[in-house]
Image (spheres, grey):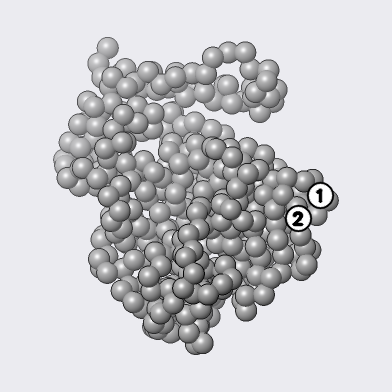
Amino acid sequence: MNTQQEWFERGSQFAQSINEMLRFVQTHGWENWKGSEPTDSRTDLAAAVLDKLRAANIEGKVEAFRSLFPPSYAPFTQFLEANGQRIEQFSFIDNERIIFFVDSLHGSRTAYLLENDIAIPLDTSITSIGKSPKNNVFATASNDHIITTDGWQGKTIKSFTRTSSLSADITQIIPFNDGMMVSLLSPQGVFILSQSGDTRIFPEGTIDEEISLSMENLALSPNNDLLAIGDQDLQHTIIDKEGKLVASIGPQSSYPHFCLFSKDSKQFISNSCHFYNGTTIGVDVSDLPGLIIAPFKESDKYRMIDDNMRIYQGVSTENYYILGDAYGWIRAITKEGKHLWEYFIGSTITGMAISDDETTLWIGSYSGILHKLLLGKGHRDPHVIGTGDHYEAFRLFIWQNESQIWKW
C-alpha cells in the first residue's frame, strides 16, 4: 500500500473511531465509556505528506492534493515545537478579508491582511489592530499612536497619543462603536484612550504602581455600555465606560480566563479555568447593576453555559456563541447552555473571527495553522472530527522555519 492509500485509509478509520466514541459519550457519558481512546497512527507518514504538500503548493496543485490527502492535525504535532506559533487578534473586514497577527515563539509579532487565501504582511510598525462590536470601526496601534478609522484603512476618525499606556504591551485593543474611544488591554492594566487622554481604569491605583496582570481578558458590550475585565488573581469585574463598578462575577472554577457579551448585549458569559478545563456561566445583563456573585458558589443569578471548557477565544452570533478551548475544539453553545455542535481544530485556539453574515469562520491556533470554515456547508473531507457540519475551504501552515506559507 502506498503513502496516499495509507494516509487516506488510516485517517478515515481514526476519524470514524473518534466520532463513534464522541457520539457514545454525548449520549451515555464518559463514565460509561469502557473502550480505549483511538489514536492516530500516521506519525510515520507525516514528513512524506508534508513534502508532498510543499510540492503541490509550488506546482499549483493544492486542490488535487487535498482530495488525495485530507488534512489532519495529530500526525504533525511532532513538528510543532520547532515550527508552531500563535495565530491571533483576528478582525473581519468584509467579503473574504480579515486581519490577523502571527506571534512567534521568539516574541516578534507581525500583522497580516488575508485576502481569500493570500496572506499579505502589513507595516512592521503595527503592534495591534482591533474592531468595534458594531459599525466596522478599526483601531490600529503603531509606535506611540492609535488611530481609529471608518472601515479598514478608511477615513480617520480620531488619533490618540499613548502616554500612560505607552510602556504597556498591548494584549488587545477594542475601539468603541463611534471611534471616539479605545479600550486597551495589557498586563500593565486596562486603559481608555479618549479626548480626555490616556487613562488607566483598571486596576485602581497610581499609574507608577507596578502592575502585572496574568491571563488578562477584556470584553466590550456591543452597545458599548459595559466593559468586562478579568485576570488570573481577580474576579470578572464589570464597569461602565467611566470606570464605575457595576458588578463582580466570581469564578466558578479557579481563575477568570475569558469573557464575552452576547451579540444583543443582553447576556454576559464568564469563563474560569483549572488546568485545561473550566466552567462558563451566563448572567443576564439586566441583573448586573450591583450584582456580586461569590466564587465557587451556586446562585440563581447565573445559569450554567458549559462545565468543561477552558475558553481562549469566542465570537457571538445572533443565536449562539462559538467558543474555542485549550484542547483545540470549537463548540457552538446557546445562551441557555445547549450544545449545538463541536468541531476539532487541533491545538489551543488563539484567534477567531466570523463574517457579518455568520456563514464563514476563521480560526487560528498555537499550532501556527489558520483555518477557514464555511459553516453548515457539509463536510469536505472524510477525516473531520466532531459533529459540526462544516466545510473547510483551506488551512494555512504559517510556520516559523518554513520558506513560505503552505496552503492545504
Residue drawn at (41%, 48%) of the image: 364
Residue drawn at (28%, 22%) of the image: 45
> Which residue is denoted by mark 2 in the rendering?
293
Q: Secondary structure at mark 1?
A: loop
User: Tag 2: residue type?
Assistant: Ile
- When asked about the image quadrant of residue 6, the answer is top left
In this rendering, the count of numbered labels is: 2
User: Which badge, 2 or 1, comes first in the chain's sequence?
Assistant: 2
x, y percent for residue 390: 50, 41
Callout 2: 10 Å neighbours few (<14), some, many (20+)? many
Callout 1: 10 Å neighbours few (<14), some, many (20+)? few
x, y percent for residue 92: 44, 62
Residue drawn at (73%, 45%) of the image: 296
Residue 175 in view, yes or no: no
CB within 8 Å, label 2 to label 1: yes
Is 82 located above or below residue 174 in the figure?
A: above
Which image quarter is the N terminus in?
top left
x, y percent for residue 273: 59, 43
Residue drawn at (37%, 50%) of the image: 87
Is 39 located above or below residue 257 in the figure?
A: above
Is 298 located above or below residue 267 in the figure?
A: above
Q: Secondary structure at mark 2?
A: strand
Report the side of 60 relative to 137 (left or right): left
Q: In the displayed image of the protein, which residue is found farthest to the bottom?
A: 195
Report the side of 190 relative to 236 (left or right): left
Which image quarter is the C terminus in?
top left
Observer-nearest residue: 274 or 122? 274
> Which residue is denoted by mark 1 in the rendering?
299
Tag shown at residue 404: none
How far, Cα to Cα, is label 2 from label 1?
Answer: 7 Å
User: Tag 1: residue type?
Assistant: Ser
x, y percent for residue 3: 26, 19
